Image (tube, rainbow, N blue to C red):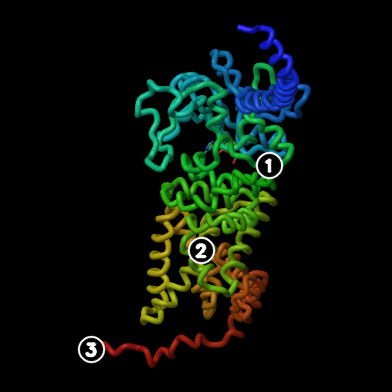
Amino acid sequence: MDFGSLNGVAIAALPFILILIVHMWHRRPTFARVAAASTATRDSMTPTIIPRDKHPISRKDLSDSALKVLYRLKDAGYESYLVGGCVRDLLLGKHPKDFDVATAGHPDEVNDLFRNARLIGRRFRLVHVRFGREMIEVATFRADHDSQSDVTDSHSRQSEGGMLLRDNVYGTIDEDARRRDFTINALYYSVEDFAIHDHANGLADLNNRVLRMIGDPESRYREDPVRMLRAVRFAAKLEFTIEPATEEPIRRLSGLLADIPAARLFEEVLKLFLSGDAVITYQLLREFDLFRYLFPLTDKYLRENTDSTAERLILEALRSTDNRIRRGKSITPAFLYAAMLWHPMQQRLQQLRREGIPPIPALHQASQEVTQQQGRATSLPKRFSGPMREIWELQQRLPQRFGKRAEQLQQHPRFRAGYDFLLMREASGETLDGLGEWWTEFQEADETQQAAMVQALGRNPKRPRRRTTRKVHPE
Ligand code: ATP
Ligand code: MG
């Protein structure tokens, strides 16, 4: 072999080899960036620790009961943290609604540590530790249901569509963070070091006021469609923007809510509408087409009736609820449901009247039917549906003020709610011939004035003279 000529070829190829090396060198940073990016993705769940002097949460912001639970767990050797809404809200300078604890201790172990504890839940086993009126919810770190091959079916179950039917596979804090819904809800506060452990880049999202689902949004919504309602609730309550990938599947998957038990949806309705941000929450629910799964009759009515009285009534009721919460006044789901279902109920009532059914039985039948149909979407416990129907009945009775009736009506235990409801109906555009104003004056008047007001109404036109109505009894 002529090595000399081979050398010549190598020398001739040298510029090309150099070009190749330079080319590869230029590509090197690209590889490095990809590597860095993949590490970032993989590492995004290794927590960033924010030490005590770098965050504003101090122990005096925390409930004593929550601290008691955390210290008891810590002393028993279980890693434990405050997590979820309380950490998020404190970082946003808001007052937390409640304090939730996450721990490595299993529910039975936690339950054994406290005399005032109770095991609850099936789909999701939890421990409630009660201190007077306050309750601390303690959840064991959860793992992905398919991350442990040896767990039996009794701990975890998923429907064909991917919905989690049971979610009791326990794991580490890191696994627990992945199972939470939004990044801002996966911030953990530790009493070991008083630091915040950020497992999902939640702090960055919190600072940017962004609501971002952890993991793939579509499969997380499929696992638990209630997360769509939660997205809307947090966006409204915190005034956060829903990040595009988190927002995109919602309208498409809204129908999955049809499979959620009515009792769970009732609980969600309470959180959505009785937390002080009901108006904006309602608007978002309608925008994302989620409202129809909570109030199907109302949604249908609103779509079919272009006249805006029904929507104005709903908005009046929600605005008044938000105001009452702001002023620390009591609120009841009965009033909310009365407003939501008033127009669908009236529609049915008018239909029954046209069929010749007298007013009172027609009202009873319409109320019953509407309550029953609503109950298929969100349950409505009797202690609320009863007062709701009384508010409706009062609407039928408030125009009848003749003789002693006005005075008696004022003594009705639900009078105040019925009167408030009447004012809201008027404010929404229903024309009731100044009935609300009459009742306002009546309540402010003294006895003589009241008597004069009733007198001024004249004789009850519906009531025929006695002589003509008296039945002649057969002897
Ligand atoms: P708030 O109590 O202010 O309404 P929150 O975020 O604390 O808001 P909770 O319902 O108390 O909401 O739940 C506590 C935490 O549990 C949440 O922050 C979240 O991390 C987790 N979580 C609750 N519900 C779900 C869910 N459906 N899917 C995933 N994680 C959830
Ligand atoms: Mg909470």
Q: Are marks 3 and 1 in contact (CB under 8 Å)?
A: no
Which of the two discs, 2 and 3, sits closer to the camera?
A: 2
Distance from disc 3 to disc 1, alpha carbons, whole Å, reads 81 Å
Q: What number is the disc on residue 210?
A: 1
Task: From the top left corner, tell me how far across and down residue 133 is, in percent.
Answer: 56, 36
Q: Point out residue 145 in the picture as x, y percentages from the top left corner.
A: 44, 29
For this rendering, which residue is in front, 456 or 234?
234
Q: Nearer the viewer, residue 79 or 20?
A: 20
- The image quarter containing residue 319 is bottom right
Residue in the foreground of this view, choosing between 67 and 153: 153
- Whether the residue under disc 1 has CB within 8 Å of ligand 1: no
The residue indicated by pointer 2 is 299
**Residue located beneath label 3 in the image:** 474
- Is 279 or 18 nearer to us in this picture? 18
In the depicted structure, whether residue 61 falls above or below residue 430 = above
Q: Earlier in the sequence, mark 3 or mark 1?
A: 1
- Residue at x-position 46% and y-position 69%: 345
**Disc 3: residue Cβ within 8 A of ligand 1's nearest atom:** no
Within-10-Å neighbours for mark 2: few <14, some 14–19, many 20+: many
Amino acid tagged 2: Asp
Residue 445 coordinates in the image, percent (x, y): 67, 73
Answer left or right for 225 relative to 86: left
> Secondary structure beneath disc 2?
helix
Q: Amino acid at mark 1?
A: Val
Which residue is pictured at 52% across the width and 20% down the height? 104
CB atoms of marks 2 and 3 within 8 Å: no
